[in-house]
Amino acid sequence: MKLRDVGELGFLKLISKYVDDPGFLKFGDDASDLRVDGKSIVVTVDSLSEGSDKLPGMSYQQFGWKCAVYSLSDLAAKGAKPLALLLSLSAPSSLEVEDAESIVKGFSSACRKFNSLYIGGDLGEAPEVVATSVGLGVAGRSIIPRSGARPGDLVAVTGYFGWTGLAFKILLEGFPVKDEQLKRLALRSVYTPKPRVNLGVALAESGVVSASIDSSDGLAKSLHELSRMSGVGFEITELPAPPRLKRYAEERGLELFDLVLYGGEEFELVVTVRQGMWPQACRVARAAGGRLLRIGKVVEENKVYYRSKEEERVIPPLGWSHFER
């Protein structure tokens, strides 16, 4: 049996018996936590490979930046304040020194931008470039799991979706976009994404959020992960796309449903807001320099679907999964 036969979730289920759960977070969440002197040290790890993750036109500096963002975004989803990141860089001996340095420079730049230390890591040789980020953060007792959503909670996101979906169509399918400004907005979303660090910490400390996940695997996949771990369902009533992208999709005959739900790598947070706390949650978000966009509600029935005035349709659990290409 090959990894492709079981897929990412199947393999995680297989190895779960070997993994310890020493803290509040359980195996399958964005990160793990350890209690130390009354505080939770939150740890996360992410790997990017050049063959799978370095997009056409992406510089090595942007590749390094994005590697750091993966870990920073996972920490943000748990409400953990980032402390430090480490980078393990493996590369072929034929890689130009300038390119290897650019990866580290990009990684370090992201750390500085989002108030985290870059404290070193490891260097090794491999057939292709592989960058692995280890993120360390700290939280009080306010860690946000994936498993806390309850019926009646509201579903919200911390920003718009759809730009990355358009960017992947441009880069991977050769989709022509004549509007240069629109094209720059789309490409920037995948070349230099930004994690919602301050917002994640503020939402956790305020206690207004019951569950949270970062959307690096796409909005649909993220909703299904929250649904699976919380044992609830979601009724989505709004597609959180920017107005400009909505108009463009309509003009060009693009399916907005797919751009928003199945783009991936947005690095926004998908959260459930406790009943009766929506006004407070919005105030917390604004004070942290961010925002919340309400997109639906948590329901008892364990299914994920979109409902508008015209239709109701199931949201399949599609999105990025390792080994399933």
Image (spheres, rainbow, N blue to C red):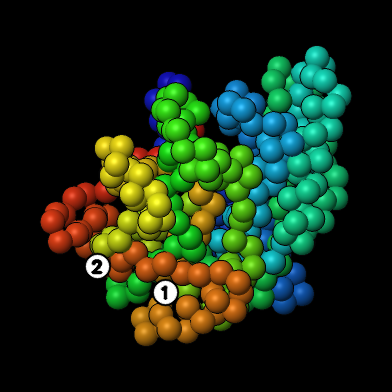
The residue to which callout 1 is attached is 273
Which one is earlier in the sequence, the residue at label 1 or at label 2?
1
Task: Give left or right: position of 57 versus 174.
Answer: right
| Picture residue at 30% right of the left edge, 68% below the top | 297
Residue that lies at the very extreme toward the top in this rendered image: 94
Q: Position of residue 14 (x, y in %)?
A: 46, 39
| Picture residue at 55% right of the left edge, 76% below the top | 286
The image shows residue 324, relative to residue 232, as above or below, that is above
Q: Distance between the residues labelled 1 and 2?
A: 15 Å
| 10 Å crowding of disc 2: few (<14), some (14-19), many (20+) | few
| Picture residue at 43% right of the left edge, 83% below the top | 279
Q: What element carries label 2?
A: loop
Task: Give left or right: position of 240 versus 53.
Answer: left
Residue 300 - label: 2
Which three-letter amino acid code belongs to the residue tagged 1?
Answer: Val
The image shows residue 292, relative to residue 193, as above or below, that is below
State the residue in front, 214 or 250. Answer: 250
Q: How many labels does the image show?
A: 2
Q: Where is residue 283 in the image (x, y as percent from the top left)?
A: 51, 82
